[in-house]
Amino acid sequence: IAGITQAPTSQILAAGRRMTLRCTQDMRHNAMYWYRQDLGLGLRLIHYSNTAGTTGKGEVPDGYSVSRANTDDFPLTLASAVPSQTSVYFCASSDGGTGADTQYFGPGTRLTVL
Amino acid sequence: GQNIDQPTEMTATEGAIVQINCTYQTSGFNGLFWYQQHAGEAPTFLSYNVLDGLEEKGRFSSFLSRSKGYSYLLLKELQMKDSASYLCAVRDSNYQLIWGAGTKLIIKP
């Protein structure tokens, strides 16, 4: 593994179903993030984690939950999917230190909720 | 509220120079980022400005004026592979990134 991986690449899901999007990084970064990207809108932060064992809510957290049991993994769960959650989901990570603290992105998961 | 404004789309010619502007209104400022995103791919980091002035990195340069809430990304000697969306993002007082919707740059031969 090099960088950040996400799974699945794409998924079609029936409304009401539960779904977990997986994210794994091998850069030993402290901070991780989940964004959604919709046409015509900027990336919007769903949840974040500054370090293993802690999580926080972003701009659009409703309907989503996360956990950070260890440094490498940051899964995003949709408890009961709705069509408005159709989007491209990006996981990102950063060192979490001072300075630029650049975020590096995974390849994304394209989710369609019908 | 917080707001990042960028043009939706721009067109330029191969070999030319293009300037993509970004204006922002955010609660606090802790740096401005430019990312490149090719269609169907993840955003990739281009530049970071935290002080006023110009940062040059090869064919790409980024400028920041904090007093004006303004930045631009300058791309020189345009190549067809530069066709992509360019995303402006500002880190606010909570150290969260606020993203613009992106500027789609179309390069014509």
Image (cartoon, coloured by chain):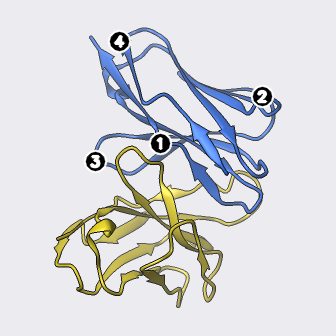
Chain colours: A yellow, B blue
SS for dot 2: loop
Q: What residue type is labelled 4?
A: Glu
Q: Name the residue under label 2.
A: B68
Q: Mark 1 points at which residue?
A: B101
Residue A69, image x, y percentages: 53, 91
B76 and B102: which is toward the camera = B102
Kindly identify the residue that appears in the image at 32 percent across and 66 percent down. Answer: A84
Which of pointers 3 and 4 lies earlier in the amino acid sequence?
4
Q: Is A106 drawn above or below residue B106 in the view shown? A: below
Q: Is A110 drawn above or below residue A71 in the view shown? A: above
A63 and B76: which is toward the camera = A63
Q: Which chain carries label 3?
A: B
Q: What residue type is labelled 2?
A: Lys
Disc 1, disc 4: CB below 8 Å? no
Q: Mark 4 points at which residue?
A: B14
The tag on residue A104 is none
Label 2 environment density (alpha carbons within 10 Å; few <14, some 14–19, many ≥20) = few
Which of pointers 2 and 4 lies earlier in the amino acid sequence?
4
Discs 2 and 3 share one subunit? yes
Which of pointers 1 and 4 lies earlier in the amino acid sequence?
4
Residue B21 relative to residue A41: left or right: right
Q: Mark 3 points at which residue?
A: B40
Q: What residue type is labelled 1?
A: Ala
Residue A29, image x, y percentages: 59, 70
- Label 1 or label 4, whichever lies nearer to me, is 1
